[in-house]
């Protein structure tokens, strides 16, 4: 298997370090006035979730991680696991709650996600960047209350609360950024 050079480092790159798979969270090329150039990286362990800082000298080789990404559909929650179905083989996989993490807040049933596998073990779930959800409950906005930037909480169909502008009402369909959990726009009414 080919190896990566420090010039190949980019956000999201999967590499093996100390026998464990890591993904690059942040990186910065540093060329000090004295000494050799290096790349300062922040790496997240895909198995434990721990984050480490590592400086890599220019020209240093990195081993690619043996990871595989599959498109899977979220079916339902069973106890403390989530059940996903491979969209190509229809095999079902149970993924523990701690592997899914906070992404479960924005994961309605039937959504198609990317599941990352390392040695046939699910180690991560990546949601689409944007989802559209129906507002199930929110306080009504008041006529004339038009202060800029004022928000109110709204509960969406997954049970999570999102801060929305005052003009959003129950039954509206809103677009949410799953990376930040922020309201983006109203896309329609149910």
Image (spheres, helix red, strand yellow):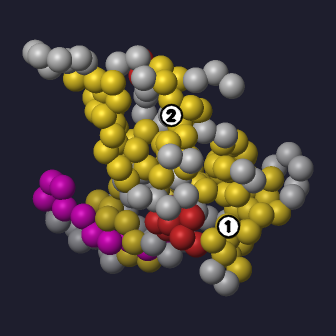
| Residues drawn in magenta | 146-156
For label 2, the residue is 13
- Quarter of the image with the C terminus is bottom right
Above or below for 21 versus 104: above
Q: Residues within 10 Å of mark 1 (few under 14, many from 20)?
A: many
Q: Residue at x 50, y 76 (%)?
A: 159
> Is residue 51 rendered to the left or right of residue 28?
right
Q: Residues within 10 Å of mark 2 (few under 14, many from 20)?
A: some
Can residue 87 be seen here?
Answer: yes
Label 1 or label 2, whichever comes before in sequence order: 2
- Quarter of the image with the N terminus is top right
Q: Secondary structure at mark 2?
A: loop
Residue placed most toward the observer, 22 or 181: 22
Which one is closest to the eye, mark 1 or mark 2? 2
Name the image quarter holding residue 104: bottom right
Q: Residue at x 72, y 45 (%)?
A: 70
For label 1, the residue is 95
Q: Residue at x 48, y 24 (%)?
A: 61
Can residue 188 be seen here?
Answer: no
Residue placed most toward the observer, 78 or 135: 78
Q: Are marks 1 and 2 in contact (CB under 8 Å)?
A: no
Hey, which residue is sitting farthest bottom in the picture?
79
């Amino acid at each position: 298997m080919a190896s990566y050079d420090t010039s190949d480092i980019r956000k999201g790159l999967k590499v093996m370090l100390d026998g464990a798979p890591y993904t690059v969270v942040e990186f910065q090329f540093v060329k000090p006035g004295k000494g050799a150039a290096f790349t300062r990286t922040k790496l997240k362990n895909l198995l434990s979730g721990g984050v480490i800082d590592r400086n890599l000298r220019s020209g240093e080789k990195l081993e690619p991680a043996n990871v595989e990404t599959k498109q899977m559909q979220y079916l339902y929650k069973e106890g403390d696991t989530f059940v996903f179905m491979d969209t190509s083989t229809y095999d079902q996989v149970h993924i523990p709650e701690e592997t899914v993490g906070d992404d479960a807040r924005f994961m309605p049933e039937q959504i198609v996600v990317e599941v990352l596998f390392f040695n046939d073990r699910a180690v991560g779930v990546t949601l689409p960047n944007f989802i559209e959800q129906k507002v199930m409950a929110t306080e009504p906005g008041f006529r004339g209350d038009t202060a800029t930037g004022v928000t109110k909480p709204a509960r969406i169909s997954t049970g999570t609360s999102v801060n929305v502008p005052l003009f959003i009402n129950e039954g509206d369909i809103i677009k949410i950024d799953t990376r930040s959990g922020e309201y983006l726009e109203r896309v329609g009414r149910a």
